[in-house]
Amino acid sequence: MVDTVDMAEKKFITINDVKTHIKTAGKGQAIVFLHGMGLSDLWLDFHQELAKDFLLYAPDHPGFGLSDNPEYFDSMEDFILHYVDLFTALNLNSVTLVGHSLGGWIGAEIASFFPQLIKKLVLISPSGLRIANSPIADIFALSAEQLAMLCFNDISKVMVVAAQRDRSDMKKLFLQDYRERTMVAKLAWTLGYSPKLERRLRRISSPTLIIWGKEDQLISTAYAQAYKNAINGSSLAIIDDCGHVPIVEQTEQTINLIKEFIMKEQG
């Protein structure tokens, strides 16, 4: 579907003077979903399906979507502490964290520094690592069209995202894209990854599921195995006919994997 009705409640929570936009829906066990680049301020079929069984929080990262763009945010540590404080504001003492791409990197960092806060962890095509002889595409050198070609196995799925954007104001869309790329550049311009993350992943103590698209041309499945090897006891699911955005390209299979993982761990 490309016409998902946004049934989420929209609100703002100020965290250390950073106004943070959050969409939330559902009830039950809390899940916080951390979005990837280009997927802020959306309510996709993926979100709607998760909210049928869980209380879903979908915040926009600082510098993304409708959240504030604080000038002092220039490192991963700023994002980690922001989200730990957000969990406190939401009264989440133990949370299931699901992150895609950049959001997966942030989620992995949070779980490695604050393992006691994470009940379960799902990483979907996370960035953040670097493997010798397995280059990752330079997102700063690519146009939006080129990036889409690398992210989607079925390029028509781009319309799932495009359908939720107000294309009547292209200047606004351009400025939002520029704003978000600028924030990503603060994190990843020099290295594009965290040199110490791989060793730090051993500190993650929560049950962890890693999901990857088999045809991911942005970040290859070599990184899926690297994450699995680094996180003790983690499991890995590779989805066929899928690129870098399983939450859009193979929504049903991704949702089923997440729900089965969470329910299994609940016993």
Image: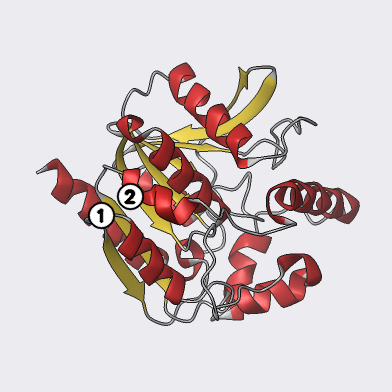
Q: Which residue is mark 2?
A: 202
Q: Residue furthest right?
A: 171
Comparing 248 with 4, the one in front is 248
Q: Are marks 2 and 1 in contact (CB under 8 Å)?
A: yes
Residue 141 screen position, x and y as percent: 80, 71
Quadrant hosting residue 212: bottom left
Residue under label 1: 232
Q: Is residue 204 left or right of residue 13?
A: left
- Is label 1 in a helix, a strand or a loop? loop
Indicate the quadrant containing the C terminus: top left, top right, bottom left or bottom right: top left
Q: Can the viewer see residue 48 in this picture?
A: no
Residue 138 located left or right of residue 170: left
Q: Quadrant of residue 17?
A: top right
Q: Name which residue type carries label 2.
A: Arg
Residue under the image location 29 percent in, 66 percent down? 236
Residue 91: image location, x then y, percent: 39, 18
Q: Residue 115 got which mark?
A: none
Q: Nearer the viewer, residue 17 or 241?
A: 17
Q: Residue at x 43, y 36 (%)?
A: 113
Inspect the image, locate mark 1, and give the three-letter code of the amino acid beneath it: Asn
- In this view, the residue farthest toward the left is 267
Image x and y of residue 188, in percent? 69, 54
Please give the name of the residue rendered at 70% of the width and 36% of the height, measured from the top-left corner: 66
Q: CA distance from mark 2 to mark 1?
A: 6 Å
Q: Secondary structure at mark 2?
A: helix
* Marks 2 and 1, the one that precedes in the sequence: 2
Comparing 141 with 147, the one in front is 141
The percent position of residue 175, horizontal first and vertical second, equals 86, 49
User: What's the residue at 33%, 67% (across, down)?
Assistant: 253
Asked whether the viewer can see residue 176, the reply is: yes
